[in-house]
Amino acid sequence: MSPFIDRLALIGVGLIGGSIARAAREYGAVRSIVAAARTEATRKRVVELGIADQVVETNGEAANDADLVIVCIPVGASGPVAAEIAGSLKPGAIVSDVGSVKGQVLKDMAPHIPKGVHLIPAHPVAGTENSGPDSGFSELFVNRWCILTPLPGVDPAAADTLEAFWKALGSEVNRLDPASHDRILAITSHLPHLIAYTIVGTADDLGGHLNSEVLKYAAGGFRDFTRIASSDPTMWRDVFMNNREAVLEVLQRFQEDLFYLQRAIRWGEGDKLFDLFTRTREIRRALIHLHQE
Amino acid sequence: MSPFIDRLALIGVGLIGGSIARAAREYGAVRSIVAAARTEATRKRVVELGIADQVVETNGEAANDADLVIVCIPVGASGPVAAEIAGSLKPGAIVSDVGSVKGQVLKDMAPHIPKGVHLIPAHPVAGTENSGPDSGFSELFVNRWCILTPLPGVDPAAADTLEAFWKALGSEVNRLDPASHDRILAITSHLPHLIAYTIVGTADDLGGHLNSEVLKYAAGGFRDFTRIASSDPTMWRDVFMNNREAVLEVLQRFQEDLFYLQRAIRWGEGDKLFDLFTRTREIRRALIHLHQE
């Protein structure tokens, strides 16, 4: 495949930025990659890894003359970063991101983006619990969804270019409005993470000798939860701070459902548990049928 | 290794019974295996799989002349099954189980076990979300804990024999009193399963067009939860019905902790989230350090 993005700028080189860098080069989606990282340690490491053609210190320097700028940082920093790159963006450039929240990111970034530059938020629904440039790998996005949330009126050619870029990295691409994205991800991703964080904390608090025993016998369920609950703290704090309404709404529903089961356990109503457990098993089968496994 | 159990009887041949059968033979821990299954379909399948030397219809028939009887059924059936095998047990035989709850199982089984027979409950902390004789495999218990919960006064030689049996299957063995077992497993296994079942149900209930979208974009967190929530409904109903007090207690703590985070999200207190997320990441590292990963 011939490179169809001439110059790609990555703002931030963690798990996602580092994976985009590797994939974009390996799958021939770009001609050159410039990466900006905030700390000297990360810049040094990115140079050692050789996953970018150029490593720079400021975000503005990276954005300079780039055809596609992808902001790969915790969503809470989206606004300030947009302000930093605004003066360097060339006309016709595409600015995108990888954040797990879309409504607030659009609100934070849009005011800074100059006329003639195309802002098209994106969310590759992919990740691991690891962080930092070393954790990235080129296959991270293969067969994973990447959701674009372009606003009405965005240049169709620019949106098509971004879609082609993500497809080149192996993703399936779909488009949603930002509010739908944020509601869907609140239940499929944000709430599961919040719950995993909670239960691992609850287990730790049981304290005393139980503490080590809990870790010792951590089996099936709990081990999966500790993995989820070891995801990047800054990224996830920002997700909850920036998708507050949608998360609080699904959390409320979840609490009601959990109280329903709690009451069934207290009163020995095994049939209520059995009915739910049978239904959730069918949902899993539907999911496998959809090839998401 | 020379077989040190002459005749092993398995009551029930699902994931756990089917895995014990395969492992006991492969690792040379027994001379012969007799298996009892309730349905004709399962008996037929066990014969086809060739994982037992003899397949019988009644539990009493299986227990007859066995040196070790392992009851591998949902814990709610422990009492009736103990009553069924009681008349067939020979003096000196060991009766054990594999249930995820130990206090109630002991209460249900003990009254039926004749004098001279050694009742020693056990819980191999291992499993998958699959069920039935086909889902078993011989490596299921390798490097997994098996917890024995012998009551004071049990014959030490019999407990040692059971411990050696599980070690032969690859398990690490530890002993706990039944109440401690039930409290620890309530937080490490039972609560995580209850929460996974709940959240998958909540997601499904969001309904309408969101329903299919939820399945479509099921990523990281949610996919893990659907796997956990596809575990055997009967087994898990019985766990919650038989470990009620311990589950309700940890559920209460979990709810308090979740409300604390819910309030932090509502009031924009990101530092409270960040502090917890940092702590849970450290717990994961401790767990990996303990070689449970």
Image (tube, coloured by chain):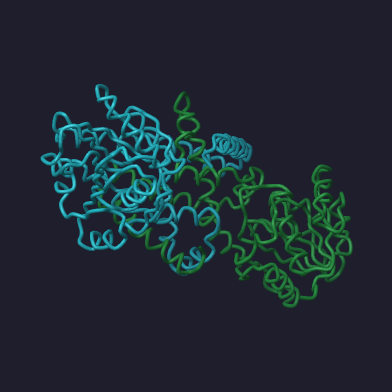
Chain colours: A green, B cyan
- Residue at the extreme bottom: A157
* Residue A201 x/y as whole percent: 51, 36
| Lateral position of residue A158 relative to residue A89, left or right | left
* Residue A277 x/y as whole percent: 34, 55
Which quarter of the figure is the C terminus of chain B placed in? top right
| Lateral position of residue A287 relative to residue A158, left or right | left
Number of on-image labels: 0
| Lateral position of residue A43 relative to residue A257, left or right | right
Which quarter of the figure is the N terminus of chain B placed in? top left
Residue closer to the observer: B81 or B261? B81
| Lateral position of residue B2 relative to residue B261, left or right | left
Residue closer to the observer: A226 or A1? A1
- Residue at the extreme left: B87
Q: Quadrant of residue A168?
A: bottom right
Residue closer to the observer: B59 or A55? B59
Q: In this view, does B89 lie above or below B23?
A: above
- Residue at the extreme top: B153
* Residue B23 x/y as whole percent: 37, 48
* Residue A131 x/y as whole percent: 68, 47
Report the residue at 60% width, 35% height from top: B282
